[in-house]
Amino acid sequence: MPDVKVMFPPDEVAKAVGRVAADIKRDYRDKNPLLVAILKSSFVFLADLVRALNMHLELDFARHFSYGRGVENSGKVRVIQRPATLVRGRDVIIVEDIVDTGLTLSLFLEALRRRKPASVKTCVLLEKPSRRKVAVPIDYLGFSVPDKFVVGYGLDYDEKFRYLPAICWLEDKSQEP
Ligand code: IMP
Ligand code: MG
C-alpha cells in the first residue's frame, strides 16, 4: 500500500475553490453559464464550486475514459458520454479535476467547440505543468502541482482514496495498493 501524504489540507482547498469561484462570478455576472463537469473525479470539486459560486447556472456532465488501472495515461482518450444539454450559443465552463498531459481536456474542448457554444472556458482544480504534452488553455486554476500522483478530494488511484477530504499524493507510485 503506498503512503498517502497531504499536499493541500481541506482549508487550503476551500480557499482555492473560493478564489476560483470569485473569479468566475465576476466574469459571468449577468450570464447563465453552463458548467460541464468531466466525470468522475471532478465531482467533489464541482459540488464545492457550485456552492461557492452561489449564482444561477446550469449543470451537465460528460464522461471520458483515459486511465485504466494505475497512474500512467494510456494516451487513448475517448468520449464515452457527451453532455445532453444543447451547447450551441451557451457560455460553457468545463470543470475538470486535473490536467496532466492535457490530452483529455484538449480533445474535449475540440469536441465541444464543434457544437458552437457562444464561449468556452476551462476551470481546473489541479495541473501538472511538467507533464504537459499538448497545450490547453486553463482559464481558472486551483493549484499547480509537481509531478506526483494525486488522490483525494474526488481523485482516485484505481478507484481508491476519492473520499479523502485533503488533496494528497501517493509516495510510492510503483507499488500496487
Ligand atoms: P490527461 O489527459 O493526461 O491530462 O489526464 C487527465 C485525466 O487523468 C484526469 O481527468 C484524471 O482523471 C487523470 N489523472 C491525471 N493525473 C492524475 C493524478 O495525479 N491523480 C489522479 N488522476 C489523475
Ligand atoms: Mg480520474
Image: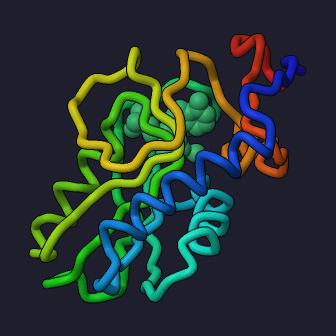
Is 136 above or below relative to 24? above
Drawn side of residue 31 relative to residue 70, left or right: left
Drawn side of residue 162 relative to residue 56, left or right: right
User: What residue appears at the point 69 percent right and 44 percent down from the top-left corner?
Assistant: 13
| Residue 81 position in % (x across, y down) | 41, 70
User: What residue appears at the point 34 percent right and 86 percent down from the top-left corner?
Assistant: 32
| Residue 146 position in % (x across, y down) | 54, 16
Which image quarter is the N terminus in? Answer: top right
User: What residue appears at the point 32 percent right and 74 percent down from the top-left corner?
Assistant: 28
Drawn side of residue 57 relative to residue 170, left or right: left
| Residue 113 position in % (x across, y down) | 14, 64
Is 120 above or below relative to 67? below
- Taking depth in this image into account, of 20 and 67 the one nearest to the observer is 20
Is 48 above or below relative to 32? above
| Residue 163 position in % (x across, y down) | 83, 51
Total numbered labels: 0
Which image quarter is the C terminus in? Answer: top right
- Taking depth in this image into account, of 88 and 119 the one nearest to the observer is 119
User: What residue appears at the point 41 percent right and 73 percent down from the top-left corner?
Assistant: 35
Drawn side of residue 111 relative to residue 140, left or right: left
Residue 3 sits in which quadrant? top right
Residue 131 sits in which quadrant? top left
